Amino acid sequence: MYYVYLLKLSDTTIYTGITTDVARRFQEHKDGKGGHYTSSRKALKILYTEECKDRSAALKREAEIKKWPRQKKLELVAGSRA
């Protein structure tokens, strides 16, 4: 099972990624091992997770979300809490 996830970073940006283990990947981001973008901005919080059936589906969904403006991403997060 793969997951798409959104993180809130210390500079208020929203990072979108995929993983098979959200908790492990979040810890990697917090430890500065999650890639250049998140290592230069502290990962503060997991905002959203979404299950995908396989890696291909997760990559497609990640690409779709990354194209969205910030407001639409925030609406996705808010909708998941409703």
Image: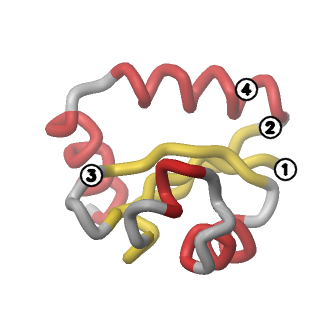
User: Alpha-carbon distance for marks 3 and 1?
Assistant: 26 Å
- On the image, numbered disc 1 is attached to which residue? 1
Q: What residue type is labelled 1?
A: Met
- On the image, numbered disc 3 is attached to which residue? 13
User: Alpha-carbon distance for marks 4 and 2?
Assistant: 6 Å
Query: Circle 1 sits in a helix, a strand or a loop, which is it?
Result: loop
**Tag on residue 76?**
none
Q: Earlier in the sequence, mark 2 or mark 1?
A: 1
Give how far across and how far down residue 82 sits, in percent.
Answer: 26, 62
Q: Which residue is drawn at 68% across and 27% down?
A: 59
Q: Do the residues labelled 2 and 1 touch (CB within 8 Å)?
A: yes
Q: What residue type is labelled 4?
A: Ala
Give how far across and how far down residue 43 sits, in percent.
Answer: 44, 70
Tell whether 79 sits left or right of 40: left
Q: Which of marks 3 and 2 is in front?
A: 3
User: Alpha-carbon distance for marks 1 and 4?
Assistant: 10 Å
- On the image, numbered disc 4 is attached to which residue? 57
Tell whether 15 sits left or right of 23: left
Q: Which of marks 3 and 1 is in front?
A: 3
Q: Is residue 54 above or below residue 37?
A: above
User: Alpha-carbon distance for marks 2 and 1?
Assistant: 6 Å
Q: Which of marks 4 and 3 is in front?
A: 3
- On the image, numbered disc 2 is attached to which residue? 53
Q: Earlier in the sequence, mark 4 or mark 3?
A: 3
User: Alpha-carbon distance for marks 3 and 2?
Assistant: 27 Å
Q: Do the residues labelled 4 and 2 touch (CB within 8 Å)?
A: yes
Q: Which residue is drawn at 31% across and 44% down?
A: 76
